Image (cartoon, grey):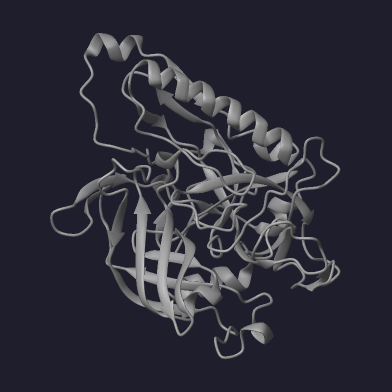
Amino acid sequence: MTSRSGKIGGAPISLLVALLLLASPVAVPAQAQEEEEQLQIGYSGLSLQGAGDADRKLASDIDAMSAKMAETKKTNDRGTRIADGTDVVLGNFQEVIRIQFSTRWGENVCTGVLLSNDAILTAGHCGCGSNYRAETQYQRAAPDSELPFIELTVSAGPVPFPGYDCRNPNGTQIGHDLALLRIVPLTLNGRRAEEVGPPGHKTNIELDFPVIRSTIQVLSQPDLKSLYIVGFGATESGELAANLQGANVGLISRHCARGRVFASYCAMFREFALGRSSSDPGSKSVDSCGGDSGGPAYRMDTDATFGTYSGKIDAPSRRTLVGIVSRALKGVVHPYPGYCGGGGIYTAVGTRPVLDWLRSENVAFLFDPDPIYQPEAE
């Protein structure tokens, strides 16, 4: 068994022990802390279930947590739907970033994921614009929420993955659909990023950076059935969501081993395909959609634990970053606007070309050579 003490780009694995808070800490009497009931959201078993069963289990856990927190009036951590998907717990995913930018066709939204305190990974086609803004969501967007998003200052980029060309996206996208944005480095005090945001709206957030592992080895695990996708994309109505969304999506092609999935070409062992099987009982057309481009596909490795009195996450869910949302599948029926609902292709992150590129760009990402999460190695 390989120890999790290794690193690539200078970031030790021990950084992954972050807690994620949605709001400022609440003072809790010592006796109340001792008696506080612990609730768990069972992320860890989701990838071993069919996508439909996983969504139903996750929704049940979140409903139970929401009901319990409502009893204690700690209802500041709310979620929202993806296209026919489940709720997301915002405080557990503050490394997922909303990216806004301009092109000659207008304003655009993509999703990205913080790999470190200064680097956001997103899709290559999300790196073909100007006037970039990057934001993390720390509370639900609602009429009574003053500032649900906190802006991160973009300092450089986008830097496309070698081989991707914004002048010829259709000809260079396959296997190359990645880009990097750099932000002014967040000041980390242990796990906490301090004084994040513009003047007058600064706050502290706690980040849980994902671990990268060999994608081929992760996807080759025979009991792996689905991944958890997260993003700011459109719902089944075709409108962009105001809040971060997530859903479990099943594996269609683990490695693109034949070079194509349905009518889509894909890069063998550098891309994979996800979608909801119509044979799944109670199946819905859960899928990534416009605005989800660049968002992460995770294997969720542990549960998230909440305290019902404090209203905060006591232990975050560990996760493995498997891929990045690239494009919709061709040759399938997409029931929702924007070619959504029929499945998509994802760029594998844990491959030698991607890891070498990230290292060449001095990204301090977290890497573990063991494809299986080992809690005793933390």
Q: Position of residue 173 (x, y in %)?
A: 64, 79
Q: Residue furthest left?
A: 200
Say if residue 2 shows up in the picture.
Answer: no
What number of labels is visible?
Answer: 0
Task: Name above or below for residue 285 compared with residue 41.
Answer: below
At 80% from the left and 44% from the top, the residue drawn is 222
Q: Residue furthest bottom?
A: 167
Q: Quadrant of the N terminus?
A: top right
At 62% from the left and 57% from the top, the residue drawn is 288
Residue 114 figure quarter: bottom left
Q: Is residue 328 left or right of residue 252?
A: left
Residue 215 figure quarter: bottom right
Q: Position of residue 336 (x, y in %)?
A: 68, 57
Say if residue 276 shows up in the picture.
Answer: yes
At 30% from the left and 15% from the top, the residue drawn is 33
Q: Position of residue 116 (x, y in %)?
A: 39, 59
Q: Position of residue 32 (x, y in %)?
A: 28, 11
Residue 192 figure quarter: top left
Viewer-proximal residue, 373 or 161? Answer: 161
